[in-house]
Image (spheres, rainbow, N blue to C red):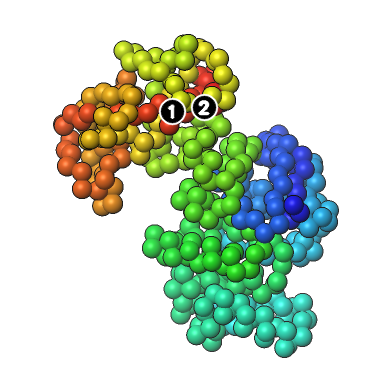
Amino acid sequence: MTHSVEIKSLDLSFGTIEVLKNLNLDIVDGEFLVLLGSSGCGKSTLLNCIAGLLEITDGQIFIKGKNVTWAQPSERGIGMVFQSYALYPQMTVEGNLSFGLRNARMPKDEIASRVARAAEILQIEPLLKRKPGALSGGQRQRVAIGRALVRDVDVFLFDEPLSNLDAKLRADLRVELKQLHATLGNTMIYVTHDQVEAMTLADRIAIMKDGIIQQLAPPSEIYSRPVNKYVADFIGSPSMNFLDGSLEGGNFRCEDMSFSMEGYSFEQPGTSGPASFGIRPEHVATGDAVANVPVRLKAPIKVVEPLGADTLALSEVAGSPFWIRMEGEARVRSGDTLEIGFDPARGSLFDAGDETRI
C-alpha cells in the first residue's frame, strides 16, 4: 500500500496558541479522505499546511514520497479548490481554465488538450466561451474544479467547495465529485463541516477537534463504533441520544431504569462505574417493532418534526432529551405518549470521565 500524503508529528502554533498538535496522518494513494469537524477545529489549517500556504512550526509533510515540508505550493504537485470560486471575471471559462498553464509556458496544443479533457469530464463544454458573470453558482464551482483538474496533479485539495451553494446544487455536485474521483482515481483531501458530505463522499473520515484527530476510519465505522462521546455526538442528525448513569456487573442503570448490556461488544470488558449510554434515534423501535427489543418504556412526545421521508419526535427519558426517528407517515402528535424500545447491543457506552468508548 503506497501513501500519497504522509504527515509526521506536525505542529502549528500562532504565537502561544497551538492550532495543530503532534498530528500524524497517512493518506493512501487514490483515497478520498474527508477532514470533518466544527469551525475552529483545525481542518482548513491542516489543508493549508499540506498545500504550503502556511508555514508549519514542527514536523514533516511528504507528497508521493517527496519531502515537501518547505517546498513552495507550485512545487508540491497539488491542485486546490477553494470555498470561493476566485475566477477572473474578465476572462472566459476557457481563459480561466488555461490561465495557469499559459503562465507556466506550456505548449498551446497541450493546453488545448487539457482544457478540452477537463471540460468534458465536468460537462462544461458549452460554457467555454462564457464569462463567470453569466454562470450559475454550480457552474462556477465546476470551472473552479476544472482549473485544478487541468494541472494534472497527483493530489487534489478541496476546502469546503460546496458550502456557498444551495441544498439541491450541493447534493448534485456531491454526486459529480464522487463520479469525478471514480473517473480520475487521484488522491483527494476534502474539508467540510457538513457530515452528510463526509459520510457520502469519503473512503475514510478524519474527525477533528481542537487540532487533534479524534477518529480516523471509514464512514460506517465512525457511525456504528464512535471512539468517544464527541464523535458519537457530532455524527448523526439528530445526534445520538445519551443517558447518564453507571455500569455495574454488565447492567446499565440510570434513575429508575436498569437494563442488561448482553450482546454489546465491549472495548474494555469488565468495566464498571459512571458511564453514558448512547442510542441513535433511528435505532429506537416504535409500533409493532417494540415487541422485538429487550428494553421498553413509555415516552411522552414534546415536539414532532415531519420531514417527508421521516418523522422526528422529541421526548425525554431519564431527564435527558431523547429523539425518535420514525417513518414519514407516522401518526404522532405533540402530547401523545408512545411506547418505544431499543436493543442495548446496538448502542454505545462511554466512560463518564474521559468519554472514551467502553
For label 1, the crowd category at 10 Å Cα-Cα, with few meaning under 14, some 14 to 19 and many 20 or more, is some
Please say if 209 is above or below 133: above
For the residue labelled by badge 1, is the local secondary structure a helix, a strand or a loop? helix
State the mark number for residue 345.
1
Position in image of residue 173 (x %, y %) = 48, 65
Position in image of residue 297 (x %, y %) = 26, 23
Q: Of the residues under marks 1 and 2, which one precedes in the sequence?
A: 2
Viewer-closest of 318 and 157: 318
**Would residue 55 be seen by someone viewing this image from the given angle?**
no
Residue 182 found in image quarter: bottom right
Q: Are marks 1 and 2 in contact (CB under 8 Å)?
A: yes
Viewer-closest of 341 and 274: 341
Residue 215 in the figure: left or right of residue 72: left
Please say if 2 is above or below 185: above
Question: Which quadrant is home to the C terminus?
Answer: top right
Please say if 271 is above or below 210: above
For label 2, the crowd category at 10 Å Cα-Cα, with few meaning under 14, some 14 to 19 and many 20 or more, is some
Residue 238 found in image quarter: top left
Residue 12 in the figure: left or right of residue 273: right
State the mark number for residue 265.
2
Position in image of residue 217 (x %, y %) = 59, 42
Residue under the point 72% across and 47% down: 26
Distance Cα–Cα, label 1 vs label 2? 7 Å
Residue type highlighted by circle 1: Ala
Viewer-closest of 188 and 343: 343
Residue under the point 28% across and 51% down: 309
For the residue labelled by badge 2, is the local secondary structure a helix, a strand or a loop? loop
Residue 152 in the figure: left or right of residue 326: right
**Would residue 175 be seen by someone viewing this image from the given angle?**
yes
Position in image of residue 234 (x %, y %) = 48, 38
Residue under the point 46% across and 11% down: 248
State the mark number for residue 195.
none
